[in-house]
Amino acid sequence: MGGHLKDRRLRLAVSAAVLVSLNLNPVMAQSQGRDAVLNACSTQREGLIKLDREYDELKRSKTSAALGEGLKQGAAVLAKGVMSGGLGRRSGGFGGALGGLGGVMGAVGSMAAQQQAQQANTSSGAAPASVFGPDLLSSAMGLNVPGISGGGAMRGYAALAVLVAIVATAEAYAQLKEQEAGGDLRKASFNIDQDAAKQLTVARQIADDGQALVDCRTQQAADINTRLASASNDKDRRAVRRERTELMGALKKDVDLTGEVVDQHTTMAKTFTQGRAMTDGASEADVLGGQAPAYAAAPAVTRLSMPKAAAAPSEGDQAAAQAPAAPAPAMVAIRATVVRSAPVASAPSLMNMPLGREVKPTTAQADGGWWEIDVAGQPGYVRAADLGPPGSAPAPVQTAAKGKGARPAATAKAPPAPPVPAGPTNIRAYNQQVIAARDNGKGRLSSLMTDIQTSQRRESVLYAWMERLTRG
């Protein structure tokens, strides 16, 4: 009796083991098949996977978290300002530069940083830090950022610029570039174009990797179609169709991968374009020169300007406001320039100002790279780089007297002209390359998926029609 029971238990154990193996083996085989299909193009996916990991680590970094927290704190300060009615004034308010919500949101990053600095320095009595202080720059130097190499503060600014371009706002990015350039908007404009140049190489690599991945998947699909057409029995056809289904799964992962990488650059293309428009007082359409942007169907034609931001006034600020305002300094034109109706380079001209003309600004300091002056009772604006303190203008060129034996008079050497910012050629090239990366990678992979799905539907309809004929 005992031996019979043992035999029965043994048979049950063997049967269970067989059933488990029958259920596990197809699953394991199917999983191995999926991996084989996905890994068939592993070389082409390698560079994209590396970039995707780097961008993910970048966005999860402490520096990124600090920026995000700063934006949230800035939003809280903004809400308090709205409740107290302290927003919207032209001077010291938040809406002056961009107007409406755009100008308000542009102040958030600055307010947050100022609030954090004030909280950190309350006990020590130190002055508030700048918008992007040394701690943030030091942290950015240690980040692994695609397209950024070298060392020192410039690397910190470059790395922070990429991070701000991805996780923050175009207004915050423009403020960072203004600070990096020491308030010189011409230099900030040039530096933004250089940021695009650094990322241009990365975008080209993404486009090349995406195209190589598409070529690999297309070859896989063609091979599957060939074997499916030549299959001699239903068993072989089912096996090939399973492989085709696995290819569809691999393509879905490829589309997600290329899309995630390109999304980072689409955001940067928008930030670089809008940041350049702000520093130039131009529009997206002006910066892109007729190109379609990578981030929208068409570029905006509204001119942008640098955001003006200020924290809620403290008791010290209120006391300073009640103190007498500093007198406006006397200035002189250090080169022939143009007085415009608004503080943007594209504003209509009010008058031409010759070299050496003395002028008295109506404000104590330049605002956004422009001095405001009075022109027949209305405000006019002159580039701050074109004015200087009395005595800084070069001596006028002396013309030789006409007549016999006259000698040409000595001419004073004019100071070298300031560097003119290069046109947004890198921004335009980068914008086009981001579009190419999107179309060559995600776009073509999505089209290949659609083609395979269409073939599957046609095949299903054909087999259903043939089955009806056979039964009929």
Image (cartoon, rainbow, N blue to C red):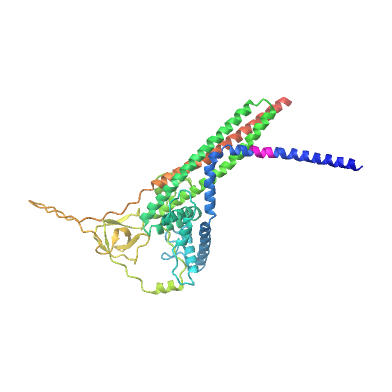
Using the image as rendered, state which of residue 277 and residue 182 is in the foreground.
182
Give the x, y percent position of residue 169.
Answer: 48, 55
Q: Is residue 297 above or below residue 133?
A: above
Question: Which residue is at 48% across, 63% downward?
Answer: 113
Instruction: Locate residue 249: give its quadrant.
Output: top right
> Is residue 452 one of those drawn in magenta?
no
Residue extending farthest front: 3
Residue extending farthest left: 404
Report the magenta residues as a range. 28-33
Give the x, y percent position of residue 463.
Answer: 67, 29
* Dominant secondary structure of the residues highlighted in magenta in the image: helix
Question: Which residue is at 83% across, 41% downward?
Answer: 10
- The quadrant of the image that shows the N terminus is top right
- The quadrant of the image that shows the C terminus is top right
Q: Is residue 425 above or below residue 227?
A: below
Can residue 281 be seen in this snapshot?
no
Give the x, y percent position of residue 12.
Answer: 83, 41
Using the image as rendered, state which of residue 154 and residue 384 is in the foreground.
154
Left-right relation of 220 to 269:
right
Give the x, y percent position of residue 78.
Answer: 50, 64
> Is residue 29 one of those drawn in magenta?
yes
Residue extending farthest right: 1
Left-right relation of 266 to 279:
right
Q: Is residue 297 above or below residue 130?
A: above
